Each structure stands twice: as structure tokens, then as C-alpha cells.
Image: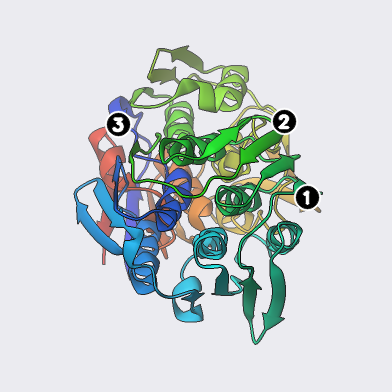
Amino acid sequence: MDKIVIDGGRPLCGQVKISGAKNAALPILMASLLTDGWCEFSNVPDLRDIRSTIEILEYLGARVERSGRVVKVDGSGLRRDEAPYDIVRKMRASVLVLGPLVARLGRARVSLPGGCAIGARPINLHLQGLASLGAKITLSHGYVEAECSRLRGAEIYFDVVTVTGTENLMTAAVLAEGKTVLRNAAREPEVVALADALNAMGAEIQGAGTAEIVIQGVDCLNPARIEIIPDRIETGTFMTAAAITGGDITICNCLPQHVEAISEKLRQTGAEVEVGEDTIRVRGCRPVTSVDVKTLPYPGFPTDMQAQFMALMAVADGHSLITETIFENRFIHVSELRRLGADITVSGNTALVRGVAGLSGAPVMATDLRASACLILAGLVAEGTTVVNRVYHLDRGYEALEKKFASLGAAIGRVS
């Protein structure tokens, strides 16, 4: 099993290019099941979750061709309506096939995704929404079964903001009869990217990026060429890397408007953040000023940046409170940060971080995707050698992260 080995203490300087967004690519690739003919997707990152998505598409009968960062999908061969456990267990986002399958075939049988290290994340809102659209929903032997000859438009209110729920119901409603209104919908950039992709295929969606999305059903969709947006969480991770190492990093091929909450928090820590059209330059400073953080749905501070920011606060001057409002169990990385010398106390969904003068390298274990990035950031500033184990989590959502850090001057490498 691979490990990441880091000799810390070096300021990172230079330019880095951001890859395509995993969380945008996954639902957009799934949406190709709604069309006959070849859809072409560019700027697709090379990640484990992307490979798992391709495996699902091919299992269902789609043809897939990949060349570098371009993926082509032809959904005309769609023949299976079941996504089995052996595939779904690899990636929770596999549940995103549910909407396209019901919309296209009138039926779907998808294994329940189960929980993960950062919480249960149930799909009850997905199922309630599909039922509102006319689908008959049953749960049997660990599978969700949905059936409807043709979905019908409806008004749906989400009790809790859900990104994948919003995406699943968007892809279901585009082929439904009549108008669907999603209220209290997720506003994340990845939701907007999916709506833009579906509209490019011939859907009629308005309001994406707001709390109310209106979808007028159409009879069919057509193939399209779509570019995947840059990854805002990778962007935020490199921004935080500049701040934690006292470095100077220019981040290219990014969308600064997607990371405004991160930029503001970094400025409060004393870092300089300069924004261009598709670039962000971050220069760290010493000492780092402690700030409080509360995760919120977009456009608030993203939960997927909470762990990385905690690493920064671990070496800040003063105390900070980090409050997690999105997922339970998302402080699992705290015990590993403590191994590096961090002083953190957790009470419920709040962590009190008392900044220390410095961290010291040690062996640590990654528990999930963002915890992996958090521990690497901590290792970059720690004195001595840090070994991050179980980095297969990292490969789910970051493309060649250790190589990008090495290009900025980090003493970092991957070993088996």
C-alpha cells in the first residue's frame, strides 16, 4: 500500500495548475446515460472515482473511450437497470445513476451506498423526491428499486440542502412530463455545472445556483461537448498550503469566484490573496492569525476544506473554534494531527484549536479524502519526516497531488 513521505519545513513557491473537479465530473458523466450518441467531456481528472464511474457506465451498457483528460461516452447501448453492490461500494456517488436510469429506462435497481468515515449521508431525500415525481420506491435486500413508465413534474422541497439529492432529481426531471420545481436546492458550483451540461444536451433548466431550480421536461436529450470546471477544493488546498508554509503560490486554471469564502478566511489569517480572472496568488505570513470557521452549504465555507484549514490553525497564533455543521464524524483527523503535536479539543461538532509553535513529523494514517490532504499540509510545515499511510483515499479526489507539491519545492514523494 502506498505512502506519502514528507520532509517538512520548506516554503512552497511557484505556479500550479488545477485539475478538473471530481464532484462536477461524476454527475455529468452519469448524465451521459440520458443520451444516444457520443458525448465528449474534456478536463476530466485521472482519479479513482472517475475510473469507478467509467466502470459503472460500462457495466450498464454505455461505451466509453478515454484519451488523456478527454472521456467520450455513448449511452445508446444502455441495457442494464441495476448498479450492483460490488461496484457501488467503491464510491458513494454511484447513487447518481438512480435519476438517469429511472428517467431513461423507467426503472432502476441501485445498491444502497451505505455510510463512510465522515458520516451516514442518507439518501432519503433522493427517494422522497423520486416518489414525488411518480416513481414507485421499494427497499429490498440492500437495494433501492424505483419504477415509473414516465416521471411527471412536481414541486419538491428539500428539508435539508443536499448536493447529490439536487443533482439526482435534476437528471430525473429533465425527461419528466411537465415542470419540476426544486426548492431549497443546493447552490454549489458543481450543481450549476451539471445544469449547464444538461442544457447543452437540450434540457430546459433555469435557476441553477439559486435555492429554486425550475426544470421543464423534454422528450429527449442529445450528445454534447462539455468541459469540466476546475476543482475548487483542490484550489483551496493549494491556497492553504501557501499560507501554512509561508510560501508564495500562484494557482492557475481556477475560478476565484468559487472560493471566495476560503479567500476571505485566509486574508483574516494575515495571508495576502490576489485574484485574477482565472488565477489566485497566495503569500503566507508569520505569525498566522487564528480565526474561527463554521462550515456551511455554498456559498459558505466548504466542509471539504475544514480539515485542511484545521491544519493551518494548528500552527496559528492563538485559539480558534472550528464548527462542523454538514457532516457528523468529520473530526476523525484530529487524533492524527495530535500525533504531529497539534493541541485540539473536540466537543460535539466543535473543535477548539490552540495554536502551537510548531509541529513535528510522525507516522500518521489518513481516514478519508480530505483528511489525507490535511495531514499532508501538516507534514509540509512539520519539523522532520511525516509518513502519511493509507493514501488510497487521496487518489479518489486529488490528481498527482504529491507531484504538484514537489514542483513547488516540497520534499515529498510516494513510496510503496
Residue 288 location, x and y as percent? Answer: 57, 24
Residue 354 location, x and y as percent? Answer: 69, 38
Q: Which mark is residue 17?
A: 3
Image quadrant for the N terminus? bottom left
> Helix or strand or loop: what does disc 3 sit on?
strand
The answer for how far apart the CA atoms under marks 3 and 2 are is: 29 Å
66 to the left or right of 264: left
User: Considering depth in this image, is 186 or 403 the residue closer to the camera?
Assistant: 186
Q: Are marks 3 and 2 in contact (CB under 8 Å)?
A: no
Q: Residue at x 45, y 12 (%)?
A: 274
Disc 2 residue crowd, few under 14, some 14–19, many 20+, Cα 10 Å: some
Q: Is residue 319 above or below residue 157?
A: above
Q: Amino acid at mark 3?
A: Lys
The quarter of the picture where residue 184 lies is top right
Q: Amino acid at mark 1?
A: Asn
The quarter of the picture where residue 13 lies is top left
User: Considering depth in this image, is 188 or 274 the residue closer to the camera?
Assistant: 188
Residue sitting farthest toward the left: 67
Residue 345 location, x and y as percent? Answer: 74, 49
Q: Are marks 3 and 1 in contact (CB under 8 Å)?
A: no
The answer for how far apart the CA atoms under marks 3 and 1 are is: 34 Å
The quarter of the picture where residue 133 lies is bottom right
Comes first in the chain, label 3 or label 2: 3
Residue sitting farthest toward the bottom: 141
> Helix or strand or loop: what does disc 2 sit on?
loop
Image quadrant for the C terminus? bottom left
Q: State the residue position of label 1.
A: 349
Q: Amino acid at mark 2?
A: Asp
Q: Which mark is residue 292?
A: 2
